[in-house]
Image: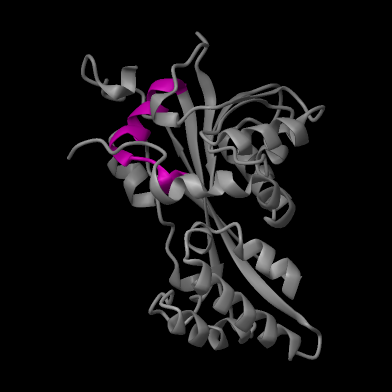
Amino acid sequence: MGEQEPYVGLATTFDTAAELYERARPGYPERLFADLAATTGLVTGPARVLEVGTGTGKATRGLLARGWQVVGLEPGRELATVARRVLAGRGDVRVVVSPFERWEADESVPFDLVFAATAWHWLDPEVAYRRAAELLRPGGHLAIVATEHVSPAGGDDFFRQVQRIYAEVGMGDGQGGPQPPGAIAAPDALAMAGSGFFASPTVHRYVWSRDYTADEYLAVLSTYSNHIAAEPWQRRTLFDGIRQLIAARPAGTVRKHYLNTLQIAVRLDRPPRAPSGSMATC
Protein backbone atom coordinates (compact mmCIF):
# COMPACT_ATOMS: atom_id res chain seq x y z
CA MET A 1 0.00 0.00 0.00
CA GLY A 2 1.42 3.40 -0.97
CA GLU A 3 1.85 6.28 1.41
CA GLN A 4 -0.85 8.93 1.25
CA GLU A 5 -0.11 12.62 0.83
CA PRO A 6 -0.26 14.29 4.27
CA TYR A 7 -2.59 17.17 5.12
CA VAL A 8 -4.92 17.23 2.12
CA GLY A 9 -8.69 17.30 1.60
CA LEU A 10 -10.89 17.73 4.66
CA ALA A 11 -7.84 17.87 6.91
CA THR A 12 -7.11 21.37 5.61
CA THR A 13 -10.54 22.82 6.45
CA PHE A 14 -9.75 23.56 10.10
CA ASP A 15 -7.16 26.17 9.17
CA THR A 16 -9.92 28.29 7.60
CA ALA A 17 -11.65 28.56 10.99
CA ALA A 18 -8.73 28.86 13.39
CA GLU A 19 -10.05 31.67 15.60
CA LEU A 20 -13.51 30.09 15.81
CA TYR A 21 -11.91 26.73 16.59
CA GLU A 22 -10.18 28.29 19.59
CA ARG A 23 -13.36 30.00 20.84
CA ALA A 24 -15.85 27.19 20.25
CA ARG A 25 -14.13 23.84 20.64
CA PRO A 26 -14.06 22.33 24.15
CA GLY A 27 -10.89 21.19 25.86
CA TYR A 28 -10.17 17.87 27.57
CA PRO A 29 -10.82 16.61 31.12
CA GLU A 30 -8.02 17.30 33.59
CA ARG A 31 -8.26 13.70 34.72
CA LEU A 32 -7.12 12.58 31.27
CA PHE A 33 -3.74 14.24 31.78
CA ALA A 34 -3.41 12.86 35.32
CA ASP A 35 -4.04 9.35 33.96
CA LEU A 36 -1.60 9.99 31.10
CA ALA A 37 1.14 10.92 33.59
CA ALA A 38 0.41 7.95 35.86
CA THR A 39 0.28 5.38 33.05
CA THR A 40 3.47 6.60 31.35
CA GLY A 41 5.33 7.08 34.64
CA LEU A 42 5.98 10.75 33.78
CA VAL A 43 4.64 11.91 37.13
CA THR A 44 7.69 13.69 38.47
CA GLY A 45 10.36 15.67 36.74
CA PRO A 46 10.43 17.14 33.23
CA ALA A 47 9.46 15.15 30.16
CA ARG A 48 9.91 15.80 26.46
CA VAL A 49 6.65 15.53 24.53
CA LEU A 50 6.01 15.65 20.80
CA GLU A 51 2.40 16.63 20.15
CA VAL A 52 0.97 15.70 16.76
CA GLY A 53 -1.77 17.99 15.45
CA THR A 54 -1.61 20.75 18.03
CA GLY A 55 -4.48 22.75 16.55
CA THR A 56 -4.94 25.85 18.71
CA GLY A 57 -3.48 24.12 21.76
CA LYS A 58 -6.63 22.74 23.35
CA ALA A 59 -4.79 19.67 24.67
CA THR A 60 -1.37 21.33 24.81
CA ARG A 61 -2.52 23.29 27.86
CA GLY A 62 -2.99 20.04 29.78
CA LEU A 63 0.49 18.84 28.80
CA LEU A 64 2.12 22.09 29.87
CA ALA A 65 0.23 22.05 33.17
CA ARG A 66 2.16 18.86 34.02
CA GLY A 67 5.41 20.78 33.64
CA TRP A 68 6.36 18.98 30.42
CA GLN A 69 8.39 20.42 27.55
CA VAL A 70 6.31 20.30 24.36
CA VAL A 71 7.14 20.48 20.67
CA GLY A 72 3.83 20.84 18.84
CA LEU A 73 3.46 19.97 15.16
CA GLU A 74 0.60 21.72 13.38
CA PRO A 75 0.37 21.75 9.57
CA GLY A 76 -2.12 24.64 9.49
CA ARG A 77 -0.41 28.03 9.58
CA GLU A 78 -3.42 29.89 10.97
CA LEU A 79 -3.99 27.28 13.67
CA ALA A 80 -0.31 27.43 14.62
CA THR A 81 -0.48 31.22 14.86
CA VAL A 82 -3.41 31.02 17.27
CA ALA A 83 -1.69 28.27 19.27
CA ARG A 84 1.45 30.35 19.74
CA ARG A 85 -0.64 33.25 21.01
CA VAL A 86 -2.81 31.35 23.49
CA LEU A 87 0.05 29.18 24.78
CA ALA A 88 2.44 32.08 25.38
CA GLY A 89 3.52 32.14 29.01
CA ARG A 90 2.02 28.75 29.84
CA GLY A 91 5.25 26.76 29.76
CA ASP A 92 8.05 25.42 27.59
CA VAL A 93 6.41 24.98 24.19
CA ARG A 94 7.44 25.38 20.57
CA VAL A 95 4.85 25.17 17.80
CA VAL A 96 6.19 24.08 14.41
CA VAL A 97 4.26 24.34 11.14
CA SER A 98 4.69 20.88 9.62
CA PRO A 99 2.82 17.64 8.95
CA PHE A 100 4.03 14.92 11.32
CA GLU A 101 4.88 12.55 8.46
CA ARG A 102 7.34 15.01 6.93
CA TRP A 103 8.77 16.75 9.96
CA GLU A 104 12.56 16.68 10.11
CA ALA A 105 13.39 16.46 13.80
CA ASP A 106 16.07 18.94 14.79
CA GLU A 107 16.58 17.49 18.26
CA SER A 108 19.20 14.84 18.98
CA VAL A 109 17.48 13.74 22.20
CA PRO A 110 14.52 11.37 21.69
CA PHE A 111 11.09 12.10 23.13
CA ASP A 112 9.52 10.51 26.19
CA LEU A 113 6.02 10.75 24.74
CA VAL A 114 4.38 11.19 21.35
CA PHE A 115 0.85 12.49 21.91
CA ALA A 116 -2.07 13.20 19.59
CA ALA A 117 -5.49 14.51 20.63
CA THR A 118 -8.33 14.08 18.10
CA ALA A 119 -5.78 14.23 15.27
CA TRP A 120 -4.26 10.77 14.74
CA HIS A 121 -7.07 9.62 12.41
CA TRP A 122 -5.90 12.17 9.84
CA LEU A 123 -2.47 10.50 9.56
CA ASP A 124 -1.23 7.80 7.21
CA PRO A 125 -0.84 4.70 9.42
CA GLU A 126 1.76 3.32 7.01
CA VAL A 127 4.03 6.13 8.19
CA ALA A 128 2.72 7.35 11.53
CA TYR A 129 3.39 4.39 13.83
CA ARG A 130 6.91 3.86 12.50
CA ARG A 131 7.67 7.56 12.73
CA ALA A 132 6.43 7.75 16.32
CA ALA A 133 8.58 4.76 17.34
CA GLU A 134 11.68 6.26 15.74
CA LEU A 135 11.24 9.54 17.64
CA LEU A 136 10.74 7.89 21.04
CA ARG A 137 13.36 6.77 23.53
CA PRO A 138 13.36 3.10 24.62
CA GLY A 139 10.47 2.74 27.04
CA GLY A 140 8.78 5.84 25.62
CA HIS A 141 5.04 5.94 24.94
CA LEU A 142 2.59 6.78 22.19
CA ALA A 143 -0.70 8.23 23.47
CA ILE A 144 -3.68 8.76 21.17
CA VAL A 145 -6.88 10.52 22.24
CA ALA A 146 -9.97 9.83 20.13
CA THR A 147 -13.12 11.94 20.57
CA GLU A 148 -16.68 10.87 19.78
CA HIS A 149 -20.10 12.44 20.18
CA VAL A 150 -22.13 9.91 22.17
CA SER A 151 -25.61 9.50 23.62
CA PRO A 152 -25.69 7.77 27.03
CA ALA A 153 -28.88 6.54 28.66
CA GLY A 154 -31.04 9.59 29.32
CA GLY A 155 -29.09 11.69 26.82
CA ASP A 156 -30.56 14.64 24.98
CA ASP A 157 -33.13 13.53 22.36
CA PHE A 158 -32.34 16.59 20.27
CA PHE A 159 -29.59 14.67 18.48
CA ARG A 160 -32.03 12.02 17.28
CA GLN A 161 -34.57 14.66 16.20
CA VAL A 162 -32.04 16.68 14.21
CA GLN A 163 -31.16 13.69 12.01
CA ARG A 164 -34.21 14.50 9.89
CA ILE A 165 -32.63 17.81 8.84
CA TYR A 166 -29.26 16.21 8.15
CA ALA A 167 -30.99 13.66 5.92
CA GLU A 168 -32.86 16.40 4.06
CA VAL A 169 -29.64 18.15 3.08
CA GLY A 170 -27.79 14.93 2.24
CA MET A 171 -25.50 14.98 5.28
CA GLY A 172 -26.99 12.12 7.28
CA ASP A 173 -24.70 9.47 8.72
CA GLY A 174 -27.21 6.61 8.42
CA GLN A 175 -26.89 5.77 12.12
CA GLY A 176 -29.82 7.77 13.44
CA GLY A 177 -27.70 9.85 15.78
CA PRO A 178 -24.83 9.33 18.20
CA GLN A 179 -24.23 5.88 19.68
CA PRO A 180 -24.11 4.89 23.38
CA PRO A 181 -20.60 5.17 24.86
CA GLY A 182 -20.47 1.44 25.52
CA ALA A 183 -20.98 0.69 21.83
CA ILE A 184 -17.76 2.47 20.84
CA ALA A 185 -14.53 0.50 21.08
CA ALA A 186 -11.11 2.12 21.47
CA PRO A 187 -10.60 3.00 17.78
CA ASP A 188 -6.80 2.80 17.60
CA ALA A 189 -6.03 -0.02 20.04
CA LEU A 190 -5.80 -2.82 17.48
CA ALA A 191 -3.72 -0.77 15.06
CA MET A 192 -1.30 0.28 17.81
CA ALA A 193 -0.70 -3.31 18.91
CA GLY A 194 -0.64 -4.60 15.34
CA SER A 195 1.82 -2.02 14.05
CA GLY A 196 4.84 -4.00 15.26
CA PHE A 197 6.18 -0.92 17.04
CA PHE A 198 4.05 -0.75 20.19
CA ALA A 199 2.64 -3.08 22.86
CA SER A 200 -1.09 -3.45 23.48
CA PRO A 201 -2.32 -0.14 24.86
CA THR A 202 -3.81 0.76 28.21
CA VAL A 203 -7.19 2.41 27.61
CA HIS A 204 -8.95 5.09 29.68
CA ARG A 205 -12.41 6.43 28.83
CA TYR A 206 -14.07 9.70 29.85
CA VAL A 207 -17.72 10.62 29.27
CA TRP A 208 -18.73 14.18 30.01
CA SER A 209 -21.22 16.75 28.78
CA ARG A 210 -21.59 20.42 27.98
CA ASP A 211 -24.68 22.57 27.48
CA TYR A 212 -24.84 24.86 24.44
CA THR A 213 -27.09 27.69 23.36
CA ALA A 214 -28.05 27.75 19.69
CA ASP A 215 -25.26 30.23 18.86
CA GLU A 216 -22.69 28.21 20.82
CA TYR A 217 -23.70 24.93 19.25
CA LEU A 218 -23.69 26.31 15.71
CA ALA A 219 -20.23 27.74 16.39
CA VAL A 220 -18.99 24.26 17.33
CA LEU A 221 -20.54 22.77 14.19
CA SER A 222 -18.81 25.47 12.14
CA THR A 223 -15.44 23.99 13.18
CA TYR A 224 -16.21 20.44 11.96
CA SER A 225 -14.61 19.52 8.66
CA ASN A 226 -17.73 18.14 6.98
CA HIS A 227 -19.77 21.21 7.96
CA ILE A 228 -17.06 23.60 6.74
CA ALA A 229 -16.86 21.72 3.43
CA ALA A 230 -20.65 21.55 2.94
CA GLU A 231 -22.31 23.52 0.17
CA PRO A 232 -23.57 26.94 1.32
CA TRP A 233 -27.22 25.91 0.83
CA GLN A 234 -26.70 22.76 2.87
CA ARG A 235 -25.13 24.65 5.74
CA ARG A 236 -27.76 27.41 5.63
CA THR A 237 -30.70 24.97 5.63
CA LEU A 238 -29.12 22.82 8.34
CA PHE A 239 -28.24 25.71 10.62
CA ASP A 240 -31.65 27.36 10.22
CA GLY A 241 -33.34 24.09 11.15
CA ILE A 242 -31.09 23.54 14.16
CA ARG A 243 -31.68 27.07 15.40
CA GLN A 244 -35.44 26.60 15.18
CA LEU A 245 -35.31 23.29 17.06
CA ILE A 246 -33.26 24.78 19.89
CA ALA A 247 -35.39 27.93 20.07
CA ALA A 248 -38.48 25.75 20.63
CA ARG A 249 -36.95 24.11 23.72
CA PRO A 250 -37.90 25.43 27.17
CA ALA A 251 -34.28 26.05 28.21
CA GLY A 252 -33.09 27.07 24.76
CA THR A 253 -30.08 24.79 25.05
CA VAL A 254 -28.84 21.33 24.05
CA ARG A 255 -26.65 18.99 26.08
CA LYS A 256 -23.93 17.27 24.09
CA HIS A 257 -22.08 14.27 25.52
CA TYR A 258 -18.48 13.59 24.57
CA LEU A 259 -16.43 10.42 24.86
CA ASN A 260 -12.65 10.86 25.02
CA THR A 261 -10.73 7.59 24.71
CA LEU A 262 -7.10 7.76 25.84
CA GLN A 263 -4.97 4.91 24.42
CA ILE A 264 -1.41 4.61 25.73
CA ALA A 265 1.15 2.09 24.44
CA VAL A 266 4.81 1.63 25.27
CA ARG A 267 7.34 1.45 22.44
CA LEU A 268 8.71 -2.03 21.87
CA ASP A 269 12.39 -2.44 22.73
CA ARG A 270 13.53 -3.16 19.19
CA PRO A 271 11.08 -1.61 16.72
CA PRO A 272 11.93 -2.43 13.10
CA ARG A 273 13.71 0.34 11.24
CA ALA A 274 12.39 2.04 8.14
CA PRO A 275 14.02 1.06 4.85
CA SER A 276 16.75 3.43 3.67
CA GLY A 277 15.32 6.42 1.80
CA SER A 278 11.75 6.02 3.10
CA MET A 279 9.65 8.98 4.17
CA ALA A 280 9.94 7.89 7.80
CA THR A 281 13.67 8.70 7.81
CA CYS A 282 13.36 12.06 6.07
**Residue 43: percent from left, percent from top:** 68, 32
Residue at (19, 37) in percent of width and height: 2
Q: Find residue 7 and report its horizontal and vertical position in percent.
A: 42, 39
Q: Which quarter of the figure has residue 238?
A: bottom right
Tell me what residue is drawn at x 48 percent, y 79 percent: 166
State the extent of the magenta-drawn residues as a range. Answer: 120-138
The answer to which of 263 and 41 lies nearer the viewer is 263
| Quadrant containing the N terminus in the rendered view | top left
Q: Residue furthest top?
A: 108
**Residue 270 appears in the figure:** no
From the top left corner, tell me how far across and down residue 275 is, in percent: 21, 19
Front residue (pair 181, 125): 125
Residue toward you, 206 or 117: 117
Magenta-colored stretch includes residue 127: yes
Q: What secondary structure prevails in the magenta region?
A: helix
Task: Check the image and report above or below for 104 versus 151.
Answer: above
The quarter of the picture where the C terminus appears is: top left
Residue 82 visible, this angle: yes
